[in-house]
Amino acid sequence: MRQLSHTDKVSKARYRYGINVHIQGNVFVNIKELAKILDLSIATVSRALNSHPEVSVATQKRVLEAAKHYGYRPNAAGRNLRKGKVNTVALLLPPGERDNFYTATFFMRVAAGLQARLRRHDIDTILHLALDEEDEKLWLQRIIEQHKADAVILTNTLLHDPRIEYLHQSQFPFATLGRSATLNGAFNWVDLDFSNVASRAVEQGKQAGFRHIALVTLGQESSQGAIFTQSWREALVQNDLPVNEEYLFHGELSEVSGYEALRYFHSLPVPPDYIIFLSDIQMLGASFYARQQHCHYPFFAGVFSSDLSSFLPVKPTGFDIPFTSLGEALADAILNAMESGQPPINALPQLRLVTQREHKMD
């Protein structure tokens, strides 16, 4: 009687048990199918895969060899369900209640680096856009109570951020894109170095011969805006330039805010002669006002959140954001937050100063 070859045995198993496998190394089976092939119980196979002492060494070896040969893949959903995990990190975008939907481009670039790093750990990223602050609160409550994700990344951080306090008290893993004074900053965060941006921008203005340097920053509750503002004041003093609080405009990350800022500066009895913006998005609105009113002010774009400002007639100067590095650093921060007992880590990915930034057309 002809002995069955290995291929025949697998084919027979496929026929008998309805197992959908392929030969030649492209075999993928679950634990139930592996147990049927080995003629063992699922419980025995599970114990063998986990080196349980009740299973003999010979059986463990047999199961492990078969698992490798047949391409056994654990059921991630079932495994995570038993561990109470869904292998998902939620990136919470700023509420879309105002004129700030430009953030889609910025966060898509950050999310690409974030997802690439998290995927190595079998973790997916989901993006959530809250309708307003109240919707954001309800969503955070649901994500914790219903465990829709294993951790959350906050953006648009505030100097005193109740979301951080809430997540900390709930013992839910989190990291932030942006710093905060909440918890004395003792949590996992990644930020842009707005202190250096403001300092370098003031130096650029002084070197160009300007003395009345204005700043367009974020609202006073914004941690990034507060850092930017304080560094602007300090840089002016260090460079022996006057600190004029009239040259300070608190706004939002929007074109409209930049438009309103330049309209305000232009209305002053003595307007500034050089204007620094936190973001090139604000500068876009200011540029429109300048063209509309036929006035001219030298601008410093702060950080480049998009490529739009590169198409302006006057090419802007500012800092390029290393989006991939920023996303990867954010992934490292949230992974660290998910490891119980680890001290928090912080990062300020290095920015690159670009003079007269111009978009290269292919």
Image (cartoon, grey):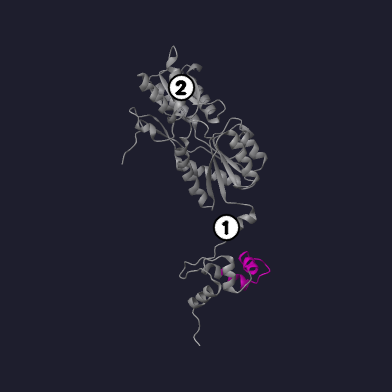
- Work out whether 144 lies above or below 352: below
Q: Is residue 35 visible?
A: yes
Spot occupied by residue 213 in the image (x, y as percentages of width and height): 44, 20
SS class, disc 1: helix
Question: Which residue is at 39% across, 33% downward?
Answer: 308
Return the residue nearer the eye: 220 or 322.
220
Q: Write the start and end of the magenta stretch as one range.
A: 42-64
**Amino acid type assigned to the residue bearing label 2 in the image:** Ala
The label number, if any, that marks residue 165 in the structure image: none
Are circles 1 and 2 on residues that touch, CB within 8 Å?
no
Quadrant that contains the C terminus = top left
Return the residue nearer the eye: 305 or 337.
305
Name the side, left or right, on which 150 lies relative to 300: right
Work out whether mark 1 precedes mark 2 in sequence or the reverse, and give the earlier one: 1
Return the residue at label 1: 76
Return the residue nearer the eye: 50 or 311.
311
Whether residue 13 appears in magenta in the rendering, the answer is: no
The label number, if any, that marks residue 261 in the structure image: 2
**Amino acid type assigned to the residue bearing label 1 in the image:** Ala
Residue extending farthest to the left is 362
SS class, disc 2: helix
Q: Is residue 354 visible?
A: no
- Work out whether 268 lies above or below 341: above
Spot occupied by residue 147 in the image (x, y as percentages of width and height): 63, 47
Quadrant position of residue 346: top right
Count residues near mark 1 (Cα–Cα under 10 Å), then give few for <14, some for 14-19, many for 20+: few
C-alpha distance separating marks 1 and 2: 52 Å
Residue extending farthest to the top is 269
